[in-house]
């Protein structure tokens, strides 16, 4: 029986995590982290005309060079580039980080928005990631990430780059602003923004086959407030513009969208 090469990728990443974790220096072994609760309001999906609100808990844990995160890294005491899912720092310095990661991708349900009814569900999968961050000037950072569907379930390849600036307004008040640009491979674009003949018959959307393309441009800013020693709050606003083949997709009815978020976290 032929094995899926993606399984080998996942196994290699897990082996790397275990090996580096065992080699982590003694002074980095203490566990630290954060627990958060975030409320968000934004589009049902990229390009959707309908918006909705959600409330989600988050968790962040770090042990030496290994981290586990579901989106709560913003509340951690050590403000590193957050790796969603299981992450490992391959290299870390004041100027440069290199990391690997594995994270769960929940896919997409066709009942998550009326506009997706009949499109079918996108399968859950695991995405493998490699990323780098360069802090090229005080308070400035440039990062890039590549993720791939490790189980070949339609998620394809996704690349993103982010430029970010952090400004300390006071010892307890921090402002983070930046922009990000992302692009998807043909498999990813077809899965999330294309329309097959079968989907066209079920929904009435015209058939659409996107290729490798830019996906979106995001602008964002957030204000983080330290509330005492262990608690932190955040308020953020974002703007997203669809690009390339995403804008031309029949699923895209609103190429420009704003989002809001607010949350509170406890760190340890």
Image (cartoon, helix red, strand yellow):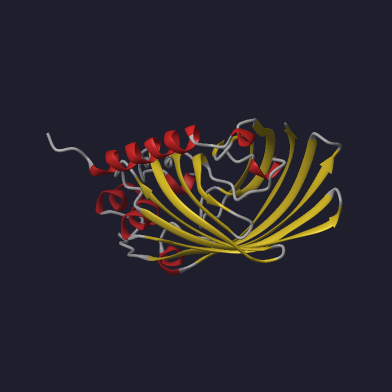
Q: Give residue 109's quadrant in the image.
A: top left
> Taking 75 as reference, is 190 left or right?
left
Is residue 142 toward the left or the right of residue 36 in the image? left
Q: Residue at x 71, y 65 (%)?
A: 138
Q: Is residue 208 above or below residue 198?
A: below
Task: Give the position of the N terminus as an image quadrant.
Answer: top left
The spot of residue 165 in percent (x, y) is 69, 63
Task: Specify whether residue 59 is in view.
Answer: no
State which quadrant residue 117 falls in: top left
Question: Is residue 135 or residue 226 the one in the foreground?
Answer: 135
Pick whichever, 64 or 183, lies toward us.
64
Residue 127 visible within the image: yes
Q: Nearer the viewer, residue 172 or 89?
A: 89
Query: In what quadrant of the picture does the C terminus appear?
Result: top right
**Picture coordinates of residue 145 (x, y %)?**
47, 56
Q: Residue at x 32, y 61 (%)?
A: 208
Quadrant in which residue 184 is drawn: bottom left
Residue under the point 35% across and 60% down: 185
Please provide percent x and percent y for residue 134: 57, 62
71 in relation to 244, above or below = above
**How many numbered marks, from 0 up?**
0
Residue 80 relative to residue 159: left or right: right
Point out residue 229 in the picture as x, y percentages from the top left corner. 83, 36
Asked if residue 193 lies left or right of residue 145, the reply is: left
């Amino acid at each position: 029986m032929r094995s899926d090469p993606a399984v080998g990728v996942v196994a290699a990443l897990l082996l790397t995590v275990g090996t580096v974790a065992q080699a982590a220096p003694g002074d980095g072994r203490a566990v630290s982290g954060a627990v958060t609760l975030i409320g968000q309001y934004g589009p049902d999906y990229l390009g959707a005309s309908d918006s909705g609100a959600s409330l989600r808990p988050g968790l962040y844990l770090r042990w030496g060079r290994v981290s586990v995160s579901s989106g709560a890294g913003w509340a951690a005491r050590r403000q590193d580039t957050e790796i969603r899912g299981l992450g490992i720092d391959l290299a870390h310095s004041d100027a440069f980080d290199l990391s690997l990661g594995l994270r769960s991708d929940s896919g997409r349900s066709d009942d998550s928005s009326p506009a997706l009814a009949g499109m079918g569900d996108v399968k859950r999968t695991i995405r493998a990631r490699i990323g780098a961050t360069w802090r090229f000037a005080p308070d400035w950072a440039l990062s890039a990430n590549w993720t791939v569907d490790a189980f070949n379930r339609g998620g394809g390849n996704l690349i993103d780059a982010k430029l970010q600036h952090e400004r300390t307004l006071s010892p307890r008040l921090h402002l983070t602003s930046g922009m990000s640009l992302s692009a998807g491979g043909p498999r990813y674009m077809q899965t999330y923004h294309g329309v097959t003949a079968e989907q066209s018959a079920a929904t009435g959307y015209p058939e659409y086959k996107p290729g490798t393309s830019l996906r979106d441009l995001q602008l964002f800013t957030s204000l983080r407030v330290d509330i005492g020693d262990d608690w932190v709050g955040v308020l953020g606003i974002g703007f997203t513009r669809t690009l390339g083949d995403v804008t031309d997709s029949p699923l895209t009815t609103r190429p420009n969208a704003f989002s809001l978020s607010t949350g509170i976290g406890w760190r340890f």
